Amino acid sequence: MATSAHPRPKIYPPPEFPPRRPGRFDRVPPAVFPAILGLFGLGLALRRGLEAAGLPIGLADLVLGAVAVLWSYAAFAYAVKMAKRPSVILDDLKVLPGRTGLAAATMGGMALAAAVAPFSAGLGKVLLAAALAGHLLVMLLTVRVLLRLPPEARDVNPGWHLTFVGFVVGGLAAPMVGWEPLARGLVWGTGIVALLIWGLSLWQLVRRVPPAPLRPLLAIHLAPASFFAMVGMSVGMPVLPEVALAVATGIFVALLAGGRWITESGFSAMWAAFTFPLSAYAGALLALGWEVAGMVVLVAALGIVPVIAYRVVTLWGSGRLAAVTNAAEV
């Protein structure tokens, strides 16, 4: 009587010996960039705060210079990672921390342009143009990746503001380099998208409660309204800055009221989502003349943003940030 043959066991390759040690920049996590963007925003808000107080802005410029060095190093590290395997950016864009991080990276370039523009309009133009082009590329690649993900992974989330509305950060530098029409165009173009994201996000929030680890991302909703207020004010747009600031204040109050619920899961790399919206809101208050309120929020940001940024950057240095955010490796 014939007996059925047992399938042969699958042969696996032997493990490498000695184990391969990853290169220094083989797994640079994009999740470090939102915290750096928050530091940029803090420096720009501090510049406004010192001006409002009639004090020299040298301290703010010193902060911005230090942040520029940090951003440049992180951008260089990620560029080295991409040079080893260009398609690694597509792998990073498959996960939420990668999408928000890469969008924040190019937004950081726009913030750098705003920091540099008062000293060199020419360099500011170059940085702004490069950052906007880079952000457009990130957006297009993100759309490509999202279309290939399962439907449940394509749900609207606050991180979409970074990808699709983040261009508005370029409006901070545009008037400084003589490109006011660009600033106006960025406000109107991204404003419509922001309204859609706010509306869809509110509908989703009513339908289902977001998991605790993702709740810090809700703070991102504060950023677009704050940027609209600042950019609109800088180019003299009527009514819009006041309306945008009112929206930002409503979101800020809601975030404060739900602070315990939002932070329920404890500290994580997602807390970087608190940094740049808080800095932007402080800057918006100061830009529109609400100096006392702006100073209060700025002082709070000075105590919160550097602490979160330090912890995130420390996670990067230890290698844990790449692991907990599922960063791609070359």
Image (spheres, rainbow, N blue to C red):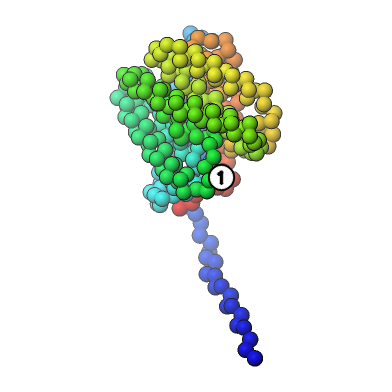
Is label 1 in a helix, a strand or a loop?
Answer: helix
Residue marked by disc 1: 152
Residue 18 at x, y = what percent? 53, 64
Expressed as whole percent of the image width and height from the top left, the position of residue 33 reads: 49, 36
- Residue 119 visible to an observer of this rendering: no
Residue 70: % across, % down: 47, 34
Q: Residues within 10 Å of mark 1 (few under 14, many from 20)?
A: few
Q: Is residue 165 above or below residue 285?
A: below
The x, y position of residue 45, in whole percent, is: 50, 19
Work out whether 235 lies above or below 83: above
Residue at 49%, 54% in the rendered image: 22
- Residue lying at the far bottom in this picture: please name it: 1
The residue nearer to you, when weighing 39 against 227, is 227
Three-letter amino acid code of the residue under disc 1: Glu
Count of labels in the image = 1
- State the image quarter where residue 218 is shown: top right
As rendered, which of 300 and 255 lies closer to the eye?
Answer: 255
Q: Quadrant of residue 292?
A: top right
Residue at 46% in and 35% down: 163
Check the picture and name the quadrant holding the N terminus: bottom right
Q: Residue at x 48, y 33 (%)?
A: 162
Q: Is residue 291 left or right of residue 181?
A: right
Whether residue 233 is visible: yes
User: Left or right: where does residue 207 sit relative to residue 145?
Assistant: right
Q: Residue 173 lies in what quarter of the image?
A: top left
Q: Is residue 175 above or below residue 32?
A: above
Q: Nearer the viewer, residue 152 or 186?
A: 152
For image coordinates 59% across by 38% down, the residue present is 269
